[in-house]
Amino acid sequence: MLNEMKSRIISGKKLIIVLLVIISLNLFSAEFIVKDFKEQPMDIELQRNPVKDVNGEYAALIKISTDLIPFSFQTNIGVVKTEKKVGEFWAYVPADATQLIFTKQDFSKLRYPVPITIKSNKVYTMKLASVGYGIDIADENLVQITFNLNEENIFIALDESSPIQKKEKYAVFKIPKGEHTFKFFKQGFDEITRAIDIQEEETISIIMQQGQTLEKMSLPGFIDITSKPDGAEIYVNDQKMGVTPANFELTAGEHKLTIRKSLYHTYSGTFVIEEGESKILEKINLISKFGYYEVTSIPVRASVFLDNKLIGKSPISRGKIESGTHTLRAEYELYHTETIEIVIKDGDDEKFELALKPAFGVLSINSKPIDDAYVFIDDDRVGTTPYIKEKIPSGKYRVRIGKELWMGAEQMVTVNDGKTTEKTLLLTKNFANLKVTADNSKIYLNNDFVANNSFLKKLIKGKHKIKATRDKHYDAEQEIYITPGNDLEIELSPKPKLASLTVKSNPYESKGSDIYLNEKKQKETTPAVFELLIGKYDVIIKHPRFLEQTKFIELKELEQGSIIFDLQTYKGSMLSQADKWKRSKWISLISSCILAGGGVYCNSVGDGYLDDYDKSYTTANAVSNRDSFEKWYNYRDVTYYISIGPLVYGLYSWIKEAQFNKLAESNKSF
């Protein structure tokens, strides 16, 4: 009898566990939620494009806004047709449908009773969301809170949930904003209960004190949690426990399980673990919450922003993106920013093109009656006419032209998107031509050197000073006034600064010698008087029977200078040169002989030391004699080498002596 009762108790427990598992599995399923359903009397879609059912009756249209596509849709009396739109699902249904039916993998089937009567040719809107999978309202309001603990193995209970033992000295919770109650306890320590109003992420320190706890500890079990894909965050009772796959010890009881992974719908459910039980949960298949997208732009290489974050230059290659509504923005210099809102549904593979409109035009500036005028835009010099700017930002600009010697013009110009703006501005003459001639002179305009001998230039109206300068002359200056259109021709002649020079030659036979002033032969011969410009002169006298002679003189203004040349005959000069080379010959030969004699002496001394070296009986004596004969032989060699120089110069002098003697005795007799 006792055994039968035990058997019934065990069977009852197993039945309870099975029921709890079934309940928990149902809780793991996601659910559809209808947030809004209403008629849109102002929507004329069906007036423009009516749709009939198989019976020829006009259908109603339900525009369903959702990010849960794909799913299956039916009504209690059938469906006329469906269409997928951007961010919407359009269902054409028969009039008087009373129930809308939605099915989707891993979702509980939804039979939605329509709250109003569906009428023919009317448009309705509906918002469809989810809970369980997907980011529900609570997920969007979560805040992370971290506890720093001074002890290991502390049990922590959040609100009314089962406590969880935390082996490390920290614990992380992700919970909705608002007030929550945390209980901390451990065997041998006082319990701590802390009510916290959580509004933002924070870290809190918990200090456990030695004492007694009133909380009864239950035996733990082990739970094994896996997911597809793995690497998802595991939260038990909103406390982070790790990432999948994971196996960890857990306090017995009923627990809430949350699985989160970026780009996947959040999983929510509950499970029960008994004391000492090792439970393996069925692998949790996370539903992807992403699609794929590509972005191109016109023009290419535009900066692309996704939800205000720069993601690169277009084209953007295929990438993964979280399901939902996003903002794409493209920016490019000189183009208007283009922004679009996109809706990505699970599994979508979309391509988006952003066509940017030009924010620029073309500006063309010309000048008359001549080109090459400077162009200024808002006081910035940008070029010369004809000027064209292919891409200039649209807007108003102050355009000005200017050119040297011309009066410019200014005008406000408006540049429009994608259009060419062409303007011609007129220049007004503000100059006259000035021609200046001054032979063999430098010409200065307003104290600036401008040309030699002649000068032609356009000058702006007003007073100007011109000057001609020439060496050893007085400057010629003149002040002029330029009137636009009245050309001027002016000749300037600097006046010379003069002196005189008398040139004579001796002896009398040298009369008629040619005179050269600064290497230029003069018409006059000696004796002669010259009127010359002031300055320095090299005066050269040349005569066939006398040697050429040069003298220097510097003449000052009004000075009467005089130079007398005493000339020497050609023959007498040659004999003088021969005597000079004869003296050089004998001096050089005697020097060479003396040096050679010194070399003979050094050789003789060195031979004596060499004989002593051969007769040496000690090492020290041999070394000393060897050093001595090597030293004297070196003296000998140096002396011989030096003697060669005077010998060669003596022979050269001998040759030069003979040459001048020969010239003196040649047929140049006078």
Image (cartoon, helix red, strand yellow):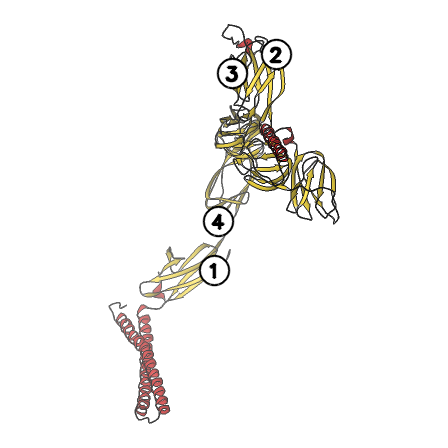
Residue 211, percent across and down? Answer: 75, 48
Viewer-nearest of labels 1 and 3? 3
Q: Image quarter for residue 401?
A: top right
Dot 2: few (<14), some (14–19), or many (≥20) neighbours within 10 Å? few
Query: What is the CA distance from the residue labelled 2 to the residue labelled 1?
Result: 115 Å
Residue 602, percent across and down? Answer: 33, 86
Viewer-nearest of labels 2 and 1? 2
Which residue has dot 4 on it? 470
Viewer-nearest of labels 3 and 2? 3
Viewer-nearest of labels 2 and 4? 2
In what quadrant of the picture does the C terminus appear? Answer: bottom left
Q: Is residue 382 left or right of residue 607?
A: right
Dot 4: few (<14), some (14–19), or many (≥20) neighbours within 10 Å? many
The residue lying toward the viewer, choosing from 460 and 45, is 45
Q: Is residue 270 left or right of residue 586?
A: right
Element on which disc 1 rests: strand
Which residue has dot 1 on it? 554
The residue type indicated by label 1 comes to: Glu
The residue type indicated by label 2 comes to: Met
Query: What is the CA distance from the residue labelled 3 to the residue labelled 2?
Result: 21 Å
Q: Image quarter for residue 644?
A: bottom left
Element on which disc 4 rests: loop
Label ID, residue 82 = 3
The residue type indicated by label 3 comes to: Thr
